[in-house]
Amino acid sequence: MQEERALSPDAQFDAHLAEGRFMIQRARRSGAYVFYPRVAEPGTGDQELEWVEVSGRGTVYATTIIRPRPPAETYNVALIDLAEGPRMMSRVEGLDPESVRIGMAVRAAIIEEDGRPLVIFRPEGATA
Amino acid sequence: MSRASLRGKAAIVGAATFGIGSAPGHGAIDLAAKAALLALGDAGLQPRDVDALFVCLPQDFLSGLSVAEYLGIDPVISDNNRTGGSAFLTHVEMAAMALDAGLCEVALITYGSNQRSASGKLVGATVTSNDFETRYRPVVPASAYALAASRHMHEYGTTRAQLAEVAVAARRWAQLNPEAFVRDPLSIEDCLSARMVSDPLTVRDCCLVTDGAGAIVMTRADRAKSMPRPPVYVLGASSAITHREISSMPDLTVTAAVDSGKRAYAQAGVSAADVDTVQLYDAFTINTILFLEDLGFCPKGEGGRFVEGGGLAPGGRLAVNTNGGGLSCVHPGMYGIFTLVEATRQIRRECGDRQLDKADIALCHGNGGSLSHQATVILGSGATL
């Protein structure tokens, strides 16, 4: 716990991911979830934030495709509405970027990319 | 409770552009200075007459100081507000307040960038984005707008062809403007078959990367009457912020232009139906559709249909971006200042082949960040006071 407190909210988020846990903050008083990590709940300024593990369930809110010059691969960038409320940028894997649809049910997974853990999403029911 | 209004308190008395498109041999501050000198000349003034300076050069964090020093201005009021490309419209808001309060006499708002000659890339490489977005490698800033477009298409059935209508209308206006940087013919099909940048936006849905500078000079309305050029009055000005990064935007189909517009209209005592021309920040084609909806020119979701059939082109239902906009006239990183210059030119009836028959009320609208900051300025001729 002492070590956790030495980390900035961003670094704490990544430290949880490195342990295989997708955790976001929740304001103790309002019960509202907060993402991205910060020192206080927006609006109220409540600094009593606790880390909680999310369900990993989400819905695609918006989607785009990036097409870099070959040989780099085409990839998806999406906004995902977490079941807990907050929206985050991520990408949907496990299907062609062209097949990602708004409204699609997705589930979070933690992968490693460029030497750091990263939350991505796959279609609900898909196997990794 | 009565609300403060800026209506008729201050006026634009000088306006100019310089180096539109390509301006090799100039640094950004040289361009900003050239536009400033032209605008001051238009107002019959010299740099030493300026006592309020509003500047925002993207690559110079202390550009307010730099331009004061460069031009020999000793401002009593200065502002380096960094809201993105909308900054200059907030400068109008702040300048009008400071002028009305008697804190200053002559306000200069200027901007210049040599991004095309210098790098060929959009200014903004120095803008720090939230790591919770950059780790997913979006194309900055296009992907943010692409996400908004995807959502608008999903909710309202907006099509890529409707987005293309915005680009084609801008090009048709540019063809009437000798100053516009890109004037080649452009068809809907050209847009649809263009290279994708971030789906559904192609390179034709994205603004230009050019050099260019713009400046305006403002003074109090009572003093404006004795200036050489017909005053263009500020009737209303307001701005609003909803977020910084696109993932924190509450609803990707509704911008804070709803709020900035509502307040600006209330100050001006006009509605969308009274507006003769709209000059808005079309960084991407979806912007035009979103802002026309949010500013009340058509209902939410109807923007795609509103722009169809050359709706925004010369002779269409609404004269939008009569200079050719950021899509076809000029886009030196931040475009907001050019909405103000073009509106001033229309109201003063200086626009040649693209001059509108009626141009008494112009709505200027700026966008900053990723649909994050919205600023609306309503300008009017002397007949509107």
Image (cartoon, rainbow, N blue to C red):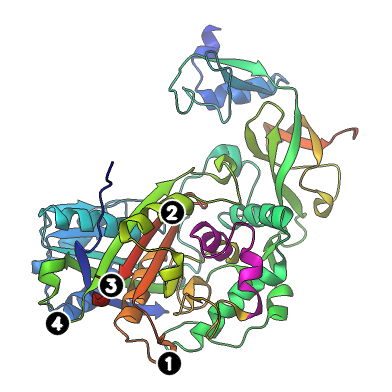
Nearest to N terminus: mark 1 or mark 2: 1
Q: How far apart are the alpha carbons under marks 4 and 2?
A: 32 Å
User: How would you classify the magenta stretch by its main secondary structure?
Assistant: helix
Name the front one of labels 1 and 3: 3
Magenta segment range? B288-309
| Residue B368, picture quadrant | bottom left
CA–CA distance in space, label 4 to label 3: 19 Å
Could you say whether the residue bearing mark 4 is in a helix, strand or loop? Answer: loop
Q: Indicate whether B292 appears above or below B140.
A: below
Q: Which mark is residue B228?
A: 4
Q: Is residue A53 visible?
A: yes
Q: Secondary structure at mark 3?
A: helix
Quadrant (top left/top right/bottom left/bottom right) for the C terminus of chain A: top right
Q: Quadrant of residue B13?
A: bottom left
Q: Could you tell whether B367 is left or right of B103 in the image?
A: right
What is the number of the mark on residue B384? 3
Question: Residue B368 has which mark?
Answer: none
In three-dimensional space, the C-alpha distance between marks 3 and 2, rounded to whole angstroms, equals 24 Å
To which residue does mark 2 refer?
A: B374
Same chain letter for marks 3 and 2: yes
Sequence-first tag of 1 and 3: 1
Q: Which amino acid, mark 4?
A: Pro
